[in-house]
Amino acid sequence: MKSIAYVLTALAVFGLAFWAYRENYATQQVLSQTQRLQRDIGQAQVRLRVLRAEWAYLNRPNRLLELSDINFDSLGLLPLRPNQFGRVDEVAFPPDPLLPITNPVDVSTMNAALPGEQFP
């Protein structure tokens, strides 16, 4: 009986050692993936900062004014003036759509004569 207990204990130890070995390598793989993702995120943030700086550089008002002057013949762009803007109360908003009639009600007095009138 003792030999069966020893064999089962040895198998349990081998099984646990195999499980710990696999978990160790799975953890190391996840850690390396996490480091790779963090490095990629850092590189993407650097690229984003560079792109934002380039966008700000390209959208300088003086540069855009020069470009609009150079390309005036083909684009016809003019500077904005305050009188080109309207007020909110001048905007014609579309009317609200009518709600569908889901439960119609028959009104029988619609065709009835009013008091003092004769019904034809």
Image (spheres, rainbow, N blue to C red):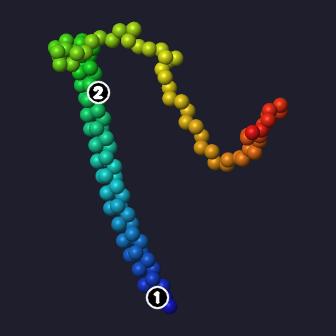
Q: Residues within 10 Å of mark 2 (few under 14, many from 20)?
A: few
Q: Is residue 63 visible?
A: no
Residue 61 place in picture, x, y as percent = 27, 14
Residue at 25 percent of width and 15 percent of height:
77
- Side of 25 where 118 appears, left or right: right
Residue at 34 percent of width and 55 percent of height:
30
Q: Residues within 10 Å of mark 1 (few under 14, many from 20)?
A: few
Of residues 73 and 10, the one nearer the viewer is 73
Residue at 17 percent of width and 15 percent of height:
73
Residue 83 place in picture, x, y as percent = 39, 8
Residue 82 position by quadrant: top left
Residue 7 place in picture, x, y as percent = 43, 84
Tag 1 residue = 4
Tag 2 residue = 52
Tell me the kind of residue under disc 1. Answer: Ile
In the image, farthest residue toward the front: 120
Circle 1 — which element?
A: helix
Residue 41 position by quadrant: top left
Using the numbered discs, state the Cα–Cα distance from disc 2 to disc 1 in whole angstroms: 71 Å
> Eyeballing the image, is 31 above or below 98?
below
First in sequence: mark 2 or mark 1?
A: 1
- Side of 48 where 109 appears, left or right: right
> Eyeballing the image, is 64 above or below 19?
above
Q: Is residue 18 visible?
A: yes
Residue at 52 percent of width and 17 percent of height:
89
- Side of 114 where 18 appears, left or right: left
Of residues 38 and 64, the one nearer the viewer is 64
Tell me the kind of residue under disc 2. Answer: Arg
Q: Report the quarter where the C terminus lies.
A: top right
